[in-house]
Amino acid sequence: MTLTLAGKRAIVTGGASGIGAATAARFVREGAKVAICDLDAESAQALALELGEQNCRAWSVDVADIERVTPFISDAAAWLGGIDILVNNAGIAIPGTVIQLDPANWRKIFAVDVDSIFYASRIAIPIMIAAGGGAVVNIASISGLRGDHALVGYNAAKGAVVNLTRAMAVDHAPDNVRVNAVCPGLIETPLTQAAKDAGLWYAWTSTIPMRRAGTAEEMASVVAFLASEEASYVSGSVIVADGGMDAATGQPD
Ligand code: NAD
């Protein structure tokens, strides 16, 4: 599929790995120019080199730190020559029930998964508006729509991402800024490696109607569509991409 992404100027947070890296690569393949940021400066830099320094530049940024995010968005906009697309992708999960989860980890999950979207969007959206509009894609999760086992901080944070997306979409629709969320199901990335290491992979994938995890590239396709002008009448939507998981009752077959 050829999307209308040629010449677009995009920012992807958490762009060094998994869904963020696949999205940055897909954007470059579609002819967009991409600024990525990540805590993992080395991997981010390696990806930028791989994608070509004229197409992709990497910044070392902790998205939970407003003092780092604010100048990053401005510097990225200066390098890109504007911002058409912002993908708020960086995210972490720390396990625990409400009894087990350390309060510092609760705050950390919210800082990385939710606060970061506020920090990046409040600088990027005015730049989009000044140039006539743009598209924001927030990476939420199926975990923002349902409860997992012992993942309360992540469930609450991703639920916040889902409704923050809707509120931003309503506010900025008149500005021609579309805001959508993607809710991936189980995707094979470093984030889910722990489940693999713990031998939980088969038990997990057997609950998915498609009987497999998704790939980062499959998520990048959804993000690319939402970011492109092909999705010109899509805003405030929460797109589930989960191999049918959310449609199932859980009845064993
Ligand atoms: P990943 O761990 O492969 O990639 C996340 C990237 O974010 C990493 O490069 C990491 O260094 C970066 N990052 C983490 N904290 C950061 C911070 N404070 N500042 C800057 N960068 C930071 O994970 P992924 O699976 O690609 O996840 C990407 C997004 O997709 C996350 O928001 C995650 O919650 C969401 N998601 C993933 C899955 C899945 O099954 N993998 C499912 C649903 C949602």
Image (spheres, rainbow, N blue to C red):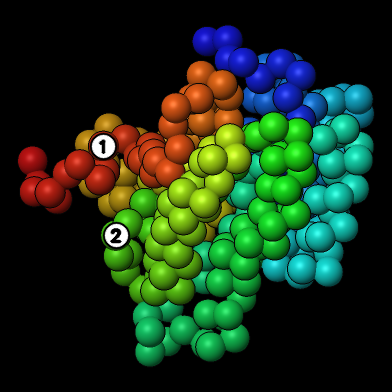
**Number of on-image labels:** 2
Q: What element carries label 2?
A: loop
- Residue 68, percent from left and from top: 83, 64
- Residue 252, percent from left and from top: 9, 47
Q: Nearer the viewer, residue 212 or 71?
A: 71
Q: Foreground mark, 1 or 2?
A: 2
- From the viewer's perspective, tell me whether residue 149 is left or right of residue 174: left
Q: Which amino acid does label 2 sit on?
A: Arg
Q: What residue type is labelled 1?
A: Gly
Q: Is residue 209 above or below residue 193?
A: above
Q: In this view, does 35 lie above or below 70?
A: above
Q: Which residue is drawn at 32% across and 35% down?
A: 243
The answer to whether residue 8 of the structure is visible from this angle is: yes
- Residue 200, percent from left and from top: 36, 56
Q: In this view, does 64 lie above or below 144?
A: below
Residue 146, numbered label: 2
Q: Residue at x 65, y 25 (%)?
A: 26
For marks 1 and 2, give the CA distance.
Answer: 14 Å
Q: Which of 15 and 130 is in front in this view?
A: 130
Quarter placement of the C terminus: top left
The residue pinned by badge 1 equals 244
Q: Report crowding for label 1: few under 14, some 14 to 19, many 20 or more residues within 10 A (C-alpha).
A: some
- From the viewer's perspective, tell me whether residue 103 is left or right of residue 46: left
First in sequence: mark 1 vs mark 2? 2
- From the viewer's perspective, tell me whether residue 6 is left or right of residue 231: right
- Residue 196, percent from left and from top: 46, 52
Q: Is mark 1 on a helix, strand or loop?
A: loop
